[in-house]
Image (cartoon, helix red, strand yellow):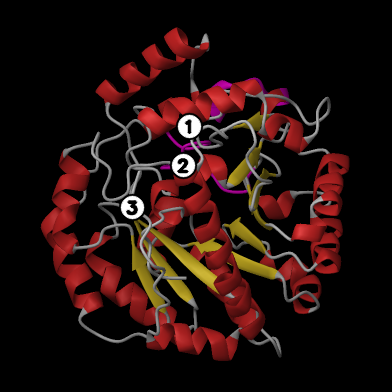
């Protein structure tokens, strides 16, 4: 676990622009950073309180596993996707609206934030109801979407300042569409432009995942996103696990938890993008000033060699603070300690309350295991970056 140092408040130009363009959201991020900092300190000071953890500061709803794309690299529906191997009735449902409504209503007084994901979360049949509930409780939500359906919800979005978006685009037209499908880039850019034309446009980030197809256009992509007035770009080196990690994970799951895993198969790959080109592109990006924040999991461009060549080594932080911060819920109502690998389940919200599961003996045992070591598949997880106690930026 990292030492918790005094919290830096970044004064980068991009952050000042954020405060000007999205004052309500900027205030939320600053408050959230202080709340996270207090939780980080409690995690460090109270190792004997893993069965009495304060309520989650973030809830992640996997609203549905269904998707309107078939991206070839997707861990759910891509070439190695684990959902393709499952019976259709187990992947076609969606999270019970009563569960969602109950959590938002009961936790509204302490205003956690929410991550709405999938599949494609905008396919959720109660999305407008959920947006209305979030607005009433003044709770921010980060909606992780492919962006194809944003135009359908323009009116809902324009009325609700608590909806923010992380849109997946993996390059300019040719590169993106080779990965995501013909016509996707133009439609998503059209939808982003539509939302940016609203009088008070929402905060929109872009997740750009790096593959051999797009590594050479990282800089050009940032230039185009700046033209579209995007608020944030997250440059995400392709998440992967090795065959060795997969076997070690299978062994841990069977021996320590009595579970035979299957979802990790979607991440089995080799990061075969051009690492020298990545270093060149990221250096070029960092050598200029941008009107938006541009982030990457790697602190230095050269760290890509360690990232790609040593699968078991985290690129930075190696402690999973997320297990004391965020509660993940699958479409069937199961609470999973890690929704990226939903093999392990600690209880269903159709039978127990969220807080009852959050501090259950199973969750306590899992947290104590993670205090000693992460699971074999955790080394490249974005949660190690997003919930890093040493992370400087908002």
User: Does the magenta segment cover residue 85?
Assistant: yes
Q: Mark 3 highlights which residue? A: 3
The magenta region covers 67-89
Tell whether label 2 touches label 1 (CB within 8 Å).
yes
Label 1 crowding class (10 Å Cα cut-off): few <14, some 14-19, many 20+?
A: many
**Can residue 354 be seen from the camera position used here?**
yes
The part of the image, by quadrant, that contains residue 147 is bottom right
The quadrant of the image that shows the N terminus is top left
Residue beneath the point at 21% across and 50% down: 273
What is the secondary structure assignment of the residue under circle 2? Answer: loop
Q: Mark 1 highlights which residue? A: 81
Q: Is residue 158 left or right of residue 320?
A: right
Q: Position of residue 32 (x, y in %)?
A: 58, 65
Position of residue 201 relative to residue 69, above or below, is below
Q: Nearer the viewer, residue 219 or 282?
A: 282
User: So how many labels did they put on this image?
Assistant: 3
Q: Position of residue 210 (x, y in %)?
A: 31, 55
Q: Is residue 306 left or right of residue 353?
A: left
- The main secondary structure of the magenta stretch is loop
Residue beneath the point at 69% across and 87% down: 200
Tell whether label 2 touches label 3 (CB within 8 Å).
no
Disc 1 or 3, which lies upstream in sequence? 3
Position of residue 166 relative to residue 358, above or below, is below
Q: Mark 2 highlights which residue? A: 74
Residue beneath the point at 63% across and 52% down: 58
Real-space Cα separation, disc 1 to disc 3, in angstroms:
37 Å
User: Does the magenta segment cover residue 205?
Assistant: no
Q: Nearer the viewer, residue 337 or 159?
A: 337
């Amino acid at each position: 676990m990292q030492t918790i140092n005094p919290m830096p408040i970044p004064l980068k130009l991009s952050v000042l622009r954020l405060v000007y363009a999205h004052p309500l959201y900027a205030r939320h991020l600053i408050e959230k950073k202080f709340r996270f900092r207090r939780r980080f300190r409690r995690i460090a000071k109270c190792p004997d309180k893993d069965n009495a953890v304060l309520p989650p500061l973030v809830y992640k709803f996997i609203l549905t596993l269904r998707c309107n794309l078939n991206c070839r690299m997707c861990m759910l529906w891509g070439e190695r996707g684990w959902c393709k191997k499952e019976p259709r009735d187990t992947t076609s449902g969606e999270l019970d609206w009563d569960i969602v409504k109950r959590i938002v209503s009961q936790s509204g007084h302490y205003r956690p934030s929410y991550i709405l994901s999938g599949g494609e979360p905008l396919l959720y049949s109660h999305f407008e109801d959920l947006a209305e509930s979030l607005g009433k409780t003044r709770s921010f939500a980060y909606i992780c979407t492919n962006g194809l359906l944003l135009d359908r919800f323009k009116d809902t979005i324009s009325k609700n300042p608590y909806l923010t978006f992380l849109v997946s685009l993996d390059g300019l037209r040719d590169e993106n569409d080779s990965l995501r499908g013909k016509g996707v880039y133009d439609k998503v850019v059209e939808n982003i432009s539509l939302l940016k034309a609203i009088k008070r446009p929402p905060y929109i980030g872009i997740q750009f995942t790096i593959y051999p197809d797009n590594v050479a256009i990282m800089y050009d992509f940032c230039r185009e996103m700046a033209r579209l007035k995007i608020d944030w770009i997250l440059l995400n080196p392709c998440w992967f696990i090795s065959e060795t990690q997969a076997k070690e994970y299978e062994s841990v799951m069977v021996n320590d938890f009595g579970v035979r895993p299957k979802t990790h198969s979607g991440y089995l790959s080799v990061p075969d993008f051009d690492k020298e080109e990545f270093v060149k592109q990221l250096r070029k990006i960092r050598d200029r000033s941008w009107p938006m924040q541009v982030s990457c999991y790697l602190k230095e461009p050269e760290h890509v060699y360690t990232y790609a060549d040593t699968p078991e080594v985290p690129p930075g932080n190696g402690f999973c603070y997320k297990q004391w911060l965020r509660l993940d819920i699958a479409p069937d109502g199961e609470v999973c300690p890690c929704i990226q690998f939903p093999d392990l389940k600690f209880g269903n919200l159709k039978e127990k309350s969220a807080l009852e599961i959050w501090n259950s003996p199973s969750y306590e045992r899992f947290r104590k295991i993670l205090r000693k070591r992460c699971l074999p598949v955790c080394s490249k997880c974005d949660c190690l970056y997003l919930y890093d106690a040493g992370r400087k930026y908002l």
